[in-house]
Amino acid sequence: MADQPLSPTFSSKLCGRVETLARVQALRQHGPVVFTNGVFDVLHRGHATYLEMARQLGGSLVVGLNTDASAKRLGKGPDRPLNNEADRALLLAALASVSLVTWFEEDTPLQLITELRPDVLVKGGDYDMDSLAETQVVRAYGGRAQAIPFVDGYSTTALVKKIQQSTRS
């Protein structure tokens, strides 16, 4: 048995855009659906803490992941994302706090949120929730939007800079 590759059960949490709506409807039977999104390029402690806190706000947590093309348009640097969208999605799906991972190609998850209608929209504390178009959409159908405190000292950008500095030394 040890010489056979393991089939990760968490890969069942990955869901293409077409299938996502039906899967989210099924998740509703477990309580409110919480939604968050991001690039999650190099998964770190700040991400894990944030996702666990988000999950505690409902019965399930759906993560909308920027595709590689969408992430590149965010202007974080010419080499970003460092990890491709399939690898980033699989790592997110491996977390116990995450119920479902899907992708969005657009610059923002506004269309995805409009389609899924999550009960709770969550973003990191570095966002002004009232200024987001996504917040307005969620509140318009009776959902709520909430910022989770930012975990200081953890960011992919800071990690990349640290790695670059150590390779120059």
Image (cartoon, rainbow, N blue to C red):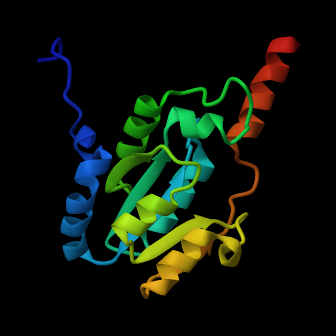
Quarter holding residue 141: bottom left
Q: Which residue is most to the bottom? A: 142
40 to 119, vertically: above or below: above
Q: Quadrant of residue 87?
A: top left
Locate the N terminus and report the quarter of the image it occupies.
top left
Query: Of residues 163 and 79, which is closer to you in this image?
Result: 79
Which residue is at the front of the view, 158 or 18?
Answer: 18
Residue 88 x/y as whole percent: 47, 35
Which residue occupies 37% across, 75% down?
Answer: 58
Residue 65 appears in the figure: yes
Residue 45 higher or lower than 125, as above or below: above
Using the rendered view, name the quadrant where residue 71 is placed. Answer: top right
Which residue is drawn at the image coordinates 47% and 46% (left, top)?
Answer: 65
Residue 169: % across, % down: 88, 13
With respect to residue 72, does 34 lie above or below? below
Q: Position of residue 31 (x, y in %)?
A: 28, 78
